[in-house]
Amino acid sequence: MTSTFPDISISTERLVLRALDEDDVPALAEMMNDEMVAAWTSVPQPFTEDGARTWITEYAPTERAAGRGLDLAVTEFLTQRLVGIIQLGKTNWHVRSTELSYIVAPWARGEGYASEAALATAQWLFGDQKFERIELRTAADNTASQQVAQKIGCISEGVLRNACIARTRTEDGGWVDLRTDFIVWSLLPEDLDGVGDQLADTGGFTSFSDWN
């Protein structure tokens, strides 16, 4: 049985999820320096192009080869511009479970890209990779991330108290750590029944079906 993720791309009608490449360096660095990304992730600030290049050429390939996770660039199908990142991590191949997270670039928010990309990834994991559980963790005050989890059918399982380190701006323009709770969500194969159709019907995103 496989214990590493394949080098794949996942296509929807609006998006292509693919491996990061060096052409993504400038856009990835710009996205990671966004205020909301800095507040809700542990990405070093400021995030340099050298940091982006190391992520793309060293970190992401190592994580995939070791079977720990998978990093996918989320790009617009028509423009090919980078609009986000999907990450899989803490993968357990015996249990067939993994943790999913997502980041959307500031220039692409409000389009439903996070839910479209996350759902496409979940469908691929359950259908092609035969996974049985996907876990998400959202900071207690990160309502946008929580809304994505709810849209794709995740079930809230509880709260990990004081388990998350977020960041907030200081008066001098720097960043300071802020401790908060994690909300834990899970997604099982049966939770996806009808979710894609519901989102398409409500304008959450355009329907999609293909990966390769």
Image (spheres, rainbow, N blue to C red):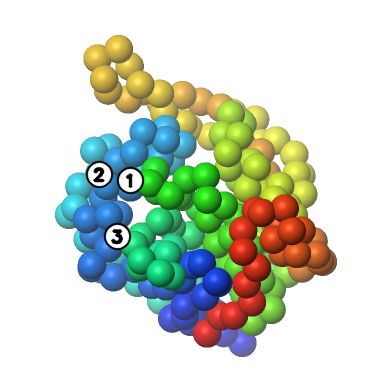
N-terminal of the two: label 2 or label 1? 1
Quarter-of-image position of residue 33: top left
Q: Which residue is mark 1?
A: 32
Q: Position of residue 68 (x, y in %)?
A: 49, 67
Q: Which residue is mark 3?
A: 55
173 or 198, which is in the foreground?
198
Q: Position of residue 87 (x, y in %)?
A: 48, 60
Q: Secondary structure at mark 3?
A: helix
- Residue 189 in sight in this render: yes
Quarter-of-image position of residue 160: top right
**Residue 93 appears left or right of 24:** right
Q: Residue at x 73, y 69 (%)?
A: 132
**In this picture, is 103 found above or below 21?**
above
Crowd around label 3: few <14 · some 14–19 · many ≥20 (10 Å): some
Q: Secondary structure at mark 2?
A: loop
The three-letter amino acid code for the residue at tag 1 is Met
**Residue 182 appears left or right of 34:** right
Crowd around label 2: few <14 · some 14–19 · many ≥20 (10 Å): some
Crowd around label 1: few <14 · some 14–19 · many ≥20 (10 Å): many
Q: Residue at x 41, y 64 (%)?
A: 75
**In this picture, is 103 found above or below 67?**
above
Toward the left, the furthest residue is 50
Say whether marks 2 and 1 touch (CB < 8 Å).
yes
Mark seen at residue 47: 2
**Residue 16 appears left or right of 129:** left
Measure how far apart labels 1 and 3 are at the Cα level.
12 Å
Measure how far apart labels 2 and 1 are at the Cα level.
6 Å
Q: Residue at x 42, y 35 (%)?
A: 36
Q: Residue at x 38, y 46 (%)?
A: 107
N-terminal of the two: label 1 or label 3? 1
Q: Secondary structure at mark 1?
A: helix
Say whether marks 2 and 3 touch (CB < 8 Å).
no
